[in-house]
Image (cartoon, rainbow, N blue to C red):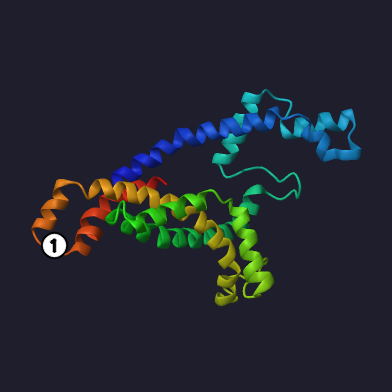
Amino acid sequence: MPGFIGRRLAYLVPVLIAVTVLTFLIAALLPGDLAIAMLADEATPEKVAALHREMGLDQPLVFQYLHWLGGALAGDLGRSVRTGEPVLSAILQRLPVTLELMLLAQLIALALGVPLGILCAVRAGGAFDRLVTASAFGKLAVPAYMLAIVLIYVFSVRLKLLPATGYVPLNEDIAGNLRSFVLPAVTLGFGEWPVLMRVLRSDMIATLQEDYIAMATAKGLKPWRILLVHALKPSSLTLVTV
């Protein structure tokens, strides 16, 4: 497992480089002039040229990219055009909220996707499997923003049980913090569980047909032990990449 995860992380390096190059080129080739947009009504040829020199926009794209990449690797992501604050500071300020939301959403997705994936694999082709699979496809067809609107209308507008907006820091009020995350976390988690369920179901169906599973059954091992120990572990490797 550690070697598998290590190889997957190593594959991320060229992907990240390609993403940075593509993103940089898209931003650079967009119509308009950033300096003129920043100066607005005060834009004059002299001020625009000075701002180009200050921001390095008068250099070739290759040098602009390398300058940005070097700064990014050193922790300098530049300054926000809108607020003027360092981009890294803005990211770090909002990172705890993002990580908490991501963690809660992933827990919800795993809590739904993993048990349903196991049950569907065990009962492959049955009524339960068909029902859950159809529900998963139906959920994938529903955009996240539509689910968010429905949840806000039901639980915030009609029932007034959960806040639709706002954030309560965890160190101030744990219950209030969790209440503020319920709707966004459920929205994201419900969008992820069908993917996890389908991946785990497919892998576990294949795993349950392996010879060592038949051997474990012949030895009289308990069904839950066969599923959770001998079948789930190899079947869950693909979930790491999802």
Viewer-side residue, 185 vs 76 = 185
Q: Is residue 77 above or below residue 187?
A: above
Q: Position of residue 178 (x, y in %)?
A: 55, 71
113 sits to left or right of 226: right
Report helix, strand or loop for mark 1: loop
- Residue at the extreme top of the image, as rendered: 60
| Residue found 45% across the figure and 36% down from its top | 13
Viewer-side residue, 201 vs 73 = 201
Residue 226 sits in quarter: bottom left
| Residue found 82% across the figure and 31% down from its top | 50
Q: Position of residue 183 (x, y in %)?
A: 58, 65
74 sits to left or right of 50: left
Report the amino acid beneath label 1: Leu
| Residue found 27% across the figure and 56% down from its top | 122
Q: Mark 1 highlights which residue? A: 221
Q: Position of residue 119 (x, y in %)?
A: 32, 59
Residue 161 sits in quarter: bottom right
- Residue at the extreme front of the image, as rendered: 127
Q: Is residue 189 above or below residue 25?
A: below
Q: Is residue 56 above or below residue 77?
A: above
| Residue found 32% across the figure and 55% down from its top | 126
Viewer-side residue, 213 vs 5 = 213
